[in-house]
């Protein structure tokens, strides 16, 4: 989209400004959805956003959640990511930190974001060497946490505790 608002604004404020410049009314539903989406740093599904939004405003509809998510993704304020969950997740940290990767614990599904400047440099070299200009990079590392390897159990996963009993 064009006319992107000033980057010094919060993602939530940029969302409101982008809605205004695109001619969308800032309804109570859209406002609630946007507040909840950017209210914390955790990745979320559309259904979890719907549930959390309805706790604040019972009038929030499923259709408005999906339309608002689509708008926020197109505006570059959210990023839809597939991190091996049953449904896509949305990354609320994308607007402020578009270049980051994800560790995903294969045992408890915990998601940890990371950034490494060396990876940025290497990516630049590799893409240039092969005659490409990257448009989007998605780095995801699936791994087991050290606690599982060292102690035989992942402290965040009941499933891991059942399938990997201590020896």
Image: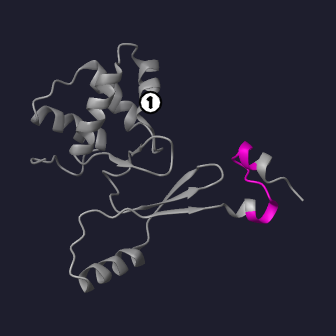
In the rendering, at what x and y percent does residue 12 appear?
Answer: 30, 38
Q: Which stretch did the figure color magenta?
A: 149-160
Q: How is the image coloured?
A: one colour
In the rendering, at what x and y percent does residue 113 appear?
Answer: 48, 58
In the rendering, at what x and y percent does residue 54 appear?
Answer: 43, 19
Q: Is residue 166 left or right of residue 125?
A: right
Seen at 29% across and 24% down, the residue is 64
Q: SS at mark 1?
A: helix
Residue at label 1?
47
Examine the image and state in which quarter residue 56 appears.
top left
Residue 7 on the magenta span = no
* Residue that extends furthest to the top in the rendered view of this protein: 59
Vertical order, 63 against 149 (above or below): above
Vertical order, 143 against 60 (above or below): below
Q: Is residue 100 left or right of residue 111?
A: left
* Residue that extends furthest to the bottom in the rendered view of this protein: 129
Q: Is residue 143 left or right of residue 72?
A: right
Mark 1 neighbour density, 10 Å: few (under 14) some (14–19) many (20 or more) = some
In this view, the residue in front, 136 or 117, is 136
Q: Which quarter of the rendered picture does the C terminus lie within?
A: bottom right
């Amino acid at each position: 989209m064009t006319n992107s608002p000033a980057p010094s604004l919060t993602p939530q404020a940029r969302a409101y400004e982008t809605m205004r410049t695109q001619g969308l009314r800032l309804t109570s539903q859209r406002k609630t959805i946007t507040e909840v989406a950017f209210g914390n740093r955790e990745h979320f599904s559309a259904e979890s956003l719907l549930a959390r939004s309805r706790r604040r405003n019972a009038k929030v509809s499923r259709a408005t959640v999906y339309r608002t998510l689509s708008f926020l993704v197109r505006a570059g304020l959210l990023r839809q990511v597939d991190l091996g969950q049953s449904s896509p997740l949305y990354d609320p940290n994308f607007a402020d930190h578009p270049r980051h990767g994800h560790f995903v614990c294969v045992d408890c599904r915990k998601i940890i974001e990371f950034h490494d400047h060396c990876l940025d440099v290497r990516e630049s070299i590799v893409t240039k060497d092969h005659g490409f200009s990257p448009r989007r990079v998605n780095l995801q590392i699936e791994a087991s946490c050290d606690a599982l390897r060292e102690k035989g159990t992942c402290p965040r996963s009941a499933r891991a505790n059942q399938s990997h009993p201590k020896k």
